[in-house]
Image: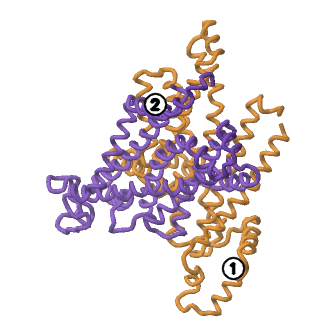
Amino acid sequence: MLKIIARRVLVAIPTLFLVSLIVFGLQKLLPGDPLLTMAGEERNPEIIEFLREKYHLNDPFYLQYLYWLRDVLTGDFGNSLRTGVPVSTLIAQKLPVTIQLAVMAMILALLIGIPTGIMSAVKKGKAADYVANAVALSGVSIPNFWLGIIMIMIVSVQWRLLPASGYVPLTEDPVQSIRTMLMPSFVLATALAAYLMRHTRSAMLGVLSSDYIRTARAKGLLPRVVVLKHALRNALMPIITLTTLLFGELLAGAVLTEQVFTIPGFGKLMVDAVFTRDYAVVQGVVLCTAAGFILMNLLADILYILINPRLRHPQ
Amino acid sequence: MSAQVTTASAEAIAPKRKLGRTMTKFLKNRSAVFGGCLVVLFILLAVFAPLLATHDPFQTSFTSIRKPPSTAFWLGTDELGRDIYSRLLYGARASLMAGVVSVTIAVIVGVPLGLIAGFYGGWTDAVISRVTEALLAIPFLILAIALAAFLGPSLTNAMIAIGLSAVPIFIRLTRGQALAVKTEDYVEGARAIGLPNPLIMARYIFPNVLPPIMVQATITVATAIIAEASLSFLGLGQQPPNPSWGSMLNTAKNFMTQAPWMSIFPGSAIFLVVLGFNLLGDGLRDALDPRDN
């Protein structure tokens, strides 16, 4: 089993390198010479030459990449072109905010998606199934930033139930922190809950028609026991992988959700950096997101091997 | 393979019959037909926007700023007094075009690469697959935002960014399908009579991997429309004063309490058209699924 896990870890490394190459390559898409903006109004040739040397811009592409990679591997993502603050510091500051948002959204999505999926499968073809499917499809089709705007209008402005925007650290005031994050995480959770519901439904339908379920029913077990104890356990397997894979969706969705609810997180950092043309920050955020995503995939695979006895011993 | 004599005639009628069966199955699926109708409706609205608009979408009017829906302005006016209904119609052009163009880019780049990777295997496949995996590790929207940021904000660049971000989805899908098809007898046959590889891929493999690609393309149009709206909402897509649903929502969010109609209508439009493409895609998938026949 350790051998399989080790092999899986080794496969992730080249992917990470390729991602870093893509992220580095992004800056080559920039129209014009980025140094001309950095050098200021006078465009003093000496300053430009100094900067060119400093950023290794006179070297060939692969050397530039290797210099950059060396820095990244030591945790140095460069400095923000605007504020001069190291990108790694910025990311470390904003990451906990987005993680709280993502974790709350994931919990909500699981709480909504899995029970609805089970219900939908058990009541297949009945009214409840159709309603659940229609709601799920709407969840996938609704742009989450729009849902955020509408919810602010109703929940915060009309009903005055929850704060419309902002962020309170969890350590400062846990209750207020969760209250502020509740609406954004619900908005972020909608699409996820819909995916989870659809996948739980189809996985449950597959399992419910299998022989051992018929046996369980035939020997007179309570329907509740058959569904929750016998069927769900097997149906949950693919859901675990899906949940980790959807982590990427969560991070991407967080970019817009944070924008709507003005939450000072990872996504807002990226968008603000895009508008101040702070490309080092954009690269840092993209690279971290991808690394996080690869890590989650790796964890999903390992978890899968651990809970699925069939995968533990290769033939 | 028992009736060898009738193979030729069966082949001649089989495609037609298959298409007919798919159509019947599709038309029986009420939600798929509803989705198709939604899509057609929005296409018509976009095409005939100049005829259907009641006002000039660019005409500002300082006497009618943020007016609620009325008989003069069916869906109200925005912060510059422009007619929201007319801007929505023209915005449909931007959204639909963005959806279709970016998916076309993704298909044109992704499908041939997927075919090549699946058909040739070996080193070619290893290289293409690794790069695809790396691209898939960057979440779709984050990649699109990053590409749009580096390319510069405009509708064209947004379409390129969304299209390129969707490329790996089509590479992976096509590669998997091509892998499955290339061991079929008719491909072996084509190889045996000495046809060149590109011709085998184009004439024998491509038509057989087409159905799942069509389904994926339809669903990706929905994703691309949301992505374009997201980029425009962030200010990275369609630039003012040109109308786009996403950029309309971007300004609308500043007037949530004073003028809720500014957010309600563009958002509903995105929702309906995306729902349409999703229903259509699901319907196509069910209709083309050979297992249910």
Residue B6 shows in the view: yes
Dividing the image into 4 quarters, which one contains the C terminus of chain A?
top right
Q: Give percent across and percent down for residue B68.
A: 21, 54
Q: CA distance from mark 1 to mark 2?
A: 64 Å
Q: Report the chain shown in orange.
A: A
Q: Residues within 10 Å of mark 1 (few under 14, many from 20)?
A: some
> Quarter-wise, where is residue A104 in the image?
top right
Q: Residue at x 33, y 45 (%)?
A: B40
Please state which amino acid type lies under the numbered disc 2. Arg
Q: Is residue A130 above or below residue A176?
A: above
Q: Position of residue A138 (x, y in %)?
A: 41, 39
Q: Is residue A81 above or below residue B195?
A: below
Residue in the foreground of this view, choosing between A168 and B84: B84
- The amino acid type found where label 1 is placed reads Tyr
Chain whose colour in the figure is purple: B
Label 2 is found on which chain of the structure? B
Label 2 element class = helix
Q: Which mark is residue B17?
A: 2
In this rendered view, identify the residue nearer to me: B222 or A192: B222
Question: Which residue sits at x=53%, y=72%?
Answer: A277
**B232 left or right of A167?**
left
Q: Which mark is drawn over residue A55?
A: 1
